[in-house]
Image: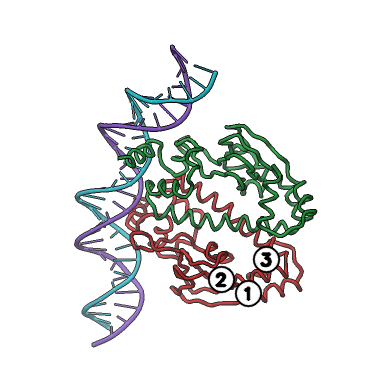
Chain colours: A red, B green, C purple, D cyan
Amino acid sequence: MPEILKAHIQKLIEIDEEELSSVLSYFHPLEVKKKQNLLTEDQTCQFNYFVANGCLRMFFINRKDQEQTVQFAIENWWLSDYTSFSTQKPAGFYIQAVEASSLLTISLLKQEELLKQHPVMERYFRLIHQRVHAASQFRIKMRYDLSREDLYHDFIKRHPGFVQRIPQYLLASYLGFSAEYLSEIRSKKRS
Amino acid sequence: MPEILKAHIQKLIEIDEEELSSVLSYFHPLEVKKKQNLLTEDQTCQFNYFVANGCLRMFFINRKDQEQTVQFAIENWWLSDYTSFSTQKPAGFYIQAVEASSLLTISLLKQEELLKQHPVMERYFRLIHQRVHAASQFRIKMRYDLSREDLYHDFIKRHPGFVQRIPQYLLASYLGFSAEYLSEIRSKKRS
DNA sequence: CGCGGGTTTGATGATGCTCAAGCCCGGTGG
DNA sequence: CCACCGGGCTTGAGCATCATCAAACCCGCG
C-alpha cells in the first residue's frame, strides 16, 4: 500500500524519487480487520496512522457510558490522538477499524527521525495539519450554524456514498444525536 | 512586539539568533483598536495574525443573522481563516479585535518566501498546526460530552481570568448558547 | 443626568433525548 | 431448509434542555 502514501506525498510537496523511497521506508504497513482496535483509552497512542484503504473511526466513552464517535478517517487521511501521540501520555480516545483496512503506521520516534533526516517532510506534515485546521474551522462553523437535522442533510450531500459504508448508528453518533432521532429524520424525508 | 514572537519561536524550535532576526523581518507589526475589523466575510483573508498582546475573535453571521463567535485568540496565538488564507478565496469568517491589540502579520506570499528561505520555519508552523489539531480534537470531545451548562463551568475553570476580559454575551456565543441562558446558569451557581 | 448597551428575569415553546416496545432481516445451528 | 436468534432500525409517548421574546433593570460613558 505504500504507493497510495507515495502518491499523496507527491501531490503535496516536491520531492525526488530517491529521497521519497527512503522516506517511505520509515513507515510500516498494517492490515486490520473490521472492529479491530488500534488504540484504547488510557493507553498511550504509539502511532500516527495513514489510511491507504478502508475506514477508521475515533471515539470515546461518554458520561452516559456510550461510544461517542468524533472522527472518521478514510482513504488518504491521517489519524491519531495527537495529544497522546505527541506527549506520549495516556489517550482520551479509542481508534477502531470500521472496515477491514490497510494502514501505514509510524511511531513518534521514527517520525522524529524521519523529520530530522528529511526536513522536507516537515512541510508535508505542516500542510496536512494546516488542512485539518482549516477543515476543523469549517466543521465548527457548521456545527454552530445548522440544526442536527440539517447537519445530516449536509453530511450526506458532502459525502455521497460514504453513508452506505457505515451503519446508521455510527453516523448518528458522529453527528451528535441519537439513532432514534436519525431514524425520524430519514422517515421525514420520504414523506 | 517582535520579542514576544521571538520568544515563542525559540520555545518551539532551535534556531540561532542571526537566522531568527532575519525571520522576524518578514512580519509586520499592526496595532488595532477595540472592535476594529481585520477580516470580513467574503473578503479574501490576506494575513496570518500572531497576537503579541490583546485579544481577537473570529465569528460569522449565522442563519438567524446574529454574530456567532467560533474562536478567541489571545497572547501567543495565531489566528486566520486558513481556508481563505491558503486558497486566497473569499472568507467565511470575520476577524475582529475584542480588545486593543498588538499583532504581527504576514501575508501568504511573504510566508511562502519565509518558508523557502528558512525551512526551519516549516517545523515551527507544523508544530503550531499540530497543537491546534490536538486542541481541536479535545474541544470537539468536550462539546460532545458536556451539556451547555457544564461547558461553561469547564471553560471558566480552564481559563480563569479570561472570563473577566470579555463581555458575557461573547462567551455565551462562543459556548453556543444564548446570553439569557448564560445568565440563568450564573444565577443558579450563586444560590 | 440621561442614554444605550449589556445583563437579568420569567413565560412559552421547539428541538431532540430517553425509554420501551416492536419490527425487520441476515446469519447460525439444528 | 427451516427456526430462531440478535443486532440494528423504527415508532411513539413523555420529558429535559435550551431558545425565543418581551420587559425591566443596571450602570458606565458621553
The chain under label 1 reads A
Q: In this orientation, which residue lies closer to the viewer: B172 or A36?
A: B172
Q: Nearer the viewer, mark 3 or mark 2?
A: 2
Q: Earlier in the sequence, mark 1 or mark 3?
A: 3
Q: Amino acid at mark 2?
A: Phe
**Image quadrant for the N terminus of chain A?**
bottom right
> Residue A68: percent from the left, percent from the top?
40, 61
Q: Name the residue carrying label 1.
A: A27
Relative to B171, is C27 on the left or the right?
Answer: left
Location of residue B77 with respect to B38 vertically, above or below: below
Q: Earlier in the sequence, mark 1 or mark 2?
A: 1
Q: Amino acid at mark 1?
A: Phe
> Residue B27: percent from the left, percent from the top?
73, 45
Instruction: Give the secondary structure at mark 3.
Output: helix
Q: What's the mark number on residue A9?
A: 3
Q: Earlier in the sequence, mark 3 or mark 2?
A: 3
> Residue B174: percent from the left, percent from the top?
47, 43
Relative to A147, is A103 on the left or the right?
Answer: right
Q: What's the mark number on residue A47?
A: 2
The residue positioned 45% from the left and 70% from the top of the image is: A40
The span from disc 1 to disc 2 (Cα, nearest Å) is: 10 Å
Same chain assignment for discs 1 and 3: yes
Q: Amino acid at mark 3?
A: Ile
